[in-house]
């Protein structure tokens, strides 16, 4: 090969590598889940300074910012089931959400103001760093804490685990039931207090933690490569064995006229374009993994398998019924496009909820209604059902005494619905079994 030919080849290779670099970099960016939204919550994505209304199941990416107003609460769920919950008037940033070349995940979260409850699962190969003021907290083992930040200072209360907080002058070690206070006006001077002063939202955080522990399947690896979203699958629906298909999942409160794209939005991300965001409280895992299939006599159900998709741009469906059009992402613009074709549930007076057929659980507070499988039977028989909502304990209760609502065992995981005997145009649905059964074995243990 001549010198000129060799030079031409090297130039071509160099151009190819340079062109490939951004794609490789983008492949390392992760998307975590906005898993709970209540009240006024706003979000902005990387390269954008404009906040917009946040909706449940929005993917949080590197550079995202999240803030709550006076009546707002939010939760962000990570792949291993770790969570960060925001109290009202709080704000957090995500300067780093990446996948290392080694396969490990690195998450960096900055708490700029307000109160955040952090529940870290402590999985291996996870880099989980919290920053507030000039302080830095790198978590390596399972821990749960409350971090409150104001202009004057910050406090960290440890509910579980041992942590070390690095400051400008020294490192403060904290254990369970201890609090670290930091004075920003006095060179971030740290003070250790050997107790925890109770805050009004501690009971809410405890209830949400109990919900994840109670409903997070011990076998998520059998139907999802990640843990996040699996507690909602257990609470809002059930798995069954469909002949010719294998294990399928179906939400409660749906009829033959329901489809999995009745409620949601096409949301725009500056890095990836438009992606489908489900409005259903369980609508994370089934929209990033596996396939939605229409089963004659059963209706739409979700089948696990395939490749995980961080940004759900193209819905995957199998055997759709006649006349069904697969949703297509917009090709122009950046505005969020809302899709609202279903019938949501309605809360009455704060302690009751009217659940309607084809609501698929939308509007049902997670973990706060007893036995959704039984309620689903009643909806199929009567079209609606009114259920009592078990709210979190009153703020006056102590953290240690706050417990999850009683009588809310996990919904059935292996029960099989009976095929419909009526034509597919009927609005009823086969009733899943209301008797709990264990899911397939294996996977993550409760924290």
Image (cartoon, rainbow, N blue to C red):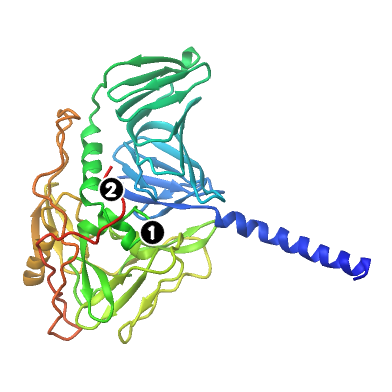
Q: Secondary structure at mark 2?
A: loop
Label 1 belongs to which residue?
A: 225
Q: Position of residue 353 (x, y in %)?
A: 13, 54
Q: Position of residue 3 (x, y in %)?
A: 93, 66
Graded by Cα atoms within 10 Å as few (under 14), some (14 to 19) or many (20 or more), the crowding at tag 2 reads few
Label 2 belongs to which residue?
A: 445
Q: Position of residue 201 (x, y in %)?
A: 24, 33
In terms of sequence position, does the residue under pointer 2 or pointer 1 come before the other?
Answer: 1
Mark 2–mark 1 distance (CA, rounded to whole Å):
15 Å
Nearest the eye: 399 or 227: 227
Q: Quadrant of residue 281?
A: bottom left
Residue 412 vertical placement versus 35 (above, below): below
- Tell me which residue sits at (21%, 40%) in the image: 207
- Tell me which residue sits at (53%, 19%) in the image: 168
* Marks 2, 1: nearer the viewer: 2
Is residue 338 among what the camera can see? no
């Amino acid at each position: 090969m001549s010198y000129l030919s060799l030079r031409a080849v090297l130039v071509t290779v160099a151009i190819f590598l340079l062109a490939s670099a951004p794609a490789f970099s983008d492949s390392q960016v992760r998307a975590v889940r906005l898993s709970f939204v209540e009240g006024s919550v706003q979000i902005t994505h990387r390269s954008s300074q404009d906040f917009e209304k946040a909706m449940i199941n929005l993917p949080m990416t590197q550079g995202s910012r999240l803030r709550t107003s006076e009546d707002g609460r939010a939760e962000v769920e990570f792949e291993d089931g770790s969570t960060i919950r925001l109290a009202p008037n709080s704000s957090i940033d995500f300067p780093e959400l990446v996948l290392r070349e080694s396969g490990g995940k690195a998450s960096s979260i900055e708490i700029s103001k307000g109160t955040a409850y952090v529940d870290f699962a402590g999985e291996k190969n996870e880099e989980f760093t919290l920053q507030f003021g000039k302080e830095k907290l790198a978590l390596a083992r399972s821990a749960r804490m409350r971090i409150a930040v104001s202009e004057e200072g910050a406090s960290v209360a440890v509910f579980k685990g041992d942590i070390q907080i690095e400051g400008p002058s020294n490192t403060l070690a904290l254990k369970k039931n201890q609090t670290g206070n930091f004075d920003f006006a006095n060179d971030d001077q740290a003070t250790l207090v050997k107790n925890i002063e109770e805050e009004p939202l501690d009971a809410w955080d405890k209830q949400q933690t109990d919900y994840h522990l109670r409903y997070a399947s011990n076998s998520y690896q059998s139907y999802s490569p990640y843990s996040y979203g699996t507690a909602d699958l257990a609470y809002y629906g059930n798995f069954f064995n469909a002949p010719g298909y294998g294990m399928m999942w179906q939400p409660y409160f749906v009829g033959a006229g329901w489809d999995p794209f009745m409620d949601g939005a096409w949301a725009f991300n500056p890095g990836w374009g438009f992606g489908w965001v489900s409005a259903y409280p369980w609508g994370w895992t089934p929209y990033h993994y596996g396939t939605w299939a229409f089963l004659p006599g059963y209706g739409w159900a979700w089948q696990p398998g395939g490749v995980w998709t961080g940004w759900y741009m193209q819905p995957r469906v199998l055997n759709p019924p006649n006349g069904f059009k697969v949703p297509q992402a917009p090709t122009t613009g950046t505005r969020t496009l809302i899709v609202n074709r279903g019938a949501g549930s309605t809360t009455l007076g704060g302690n009751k909820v009217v659940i309607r057929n084809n609501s698929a659980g939308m509007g049902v507070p997670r973990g706060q209604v007893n036995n959704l499988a039984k309620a689903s039977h009643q909806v199929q028989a009567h079209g609606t059902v009114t259920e009592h909502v078990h709210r979190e304990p009153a703020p006056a209760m102590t953290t240690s005494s706050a417990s999850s609502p009683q009588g809310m065992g996990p919904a059935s995981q292996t029960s099989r619905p009976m095929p419909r005997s009526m034509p597919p145009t009927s609005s009823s649905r086969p009733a899943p079994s209301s008797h709990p059964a264990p899911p397939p074995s294996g996977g993550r243990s409760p924290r």
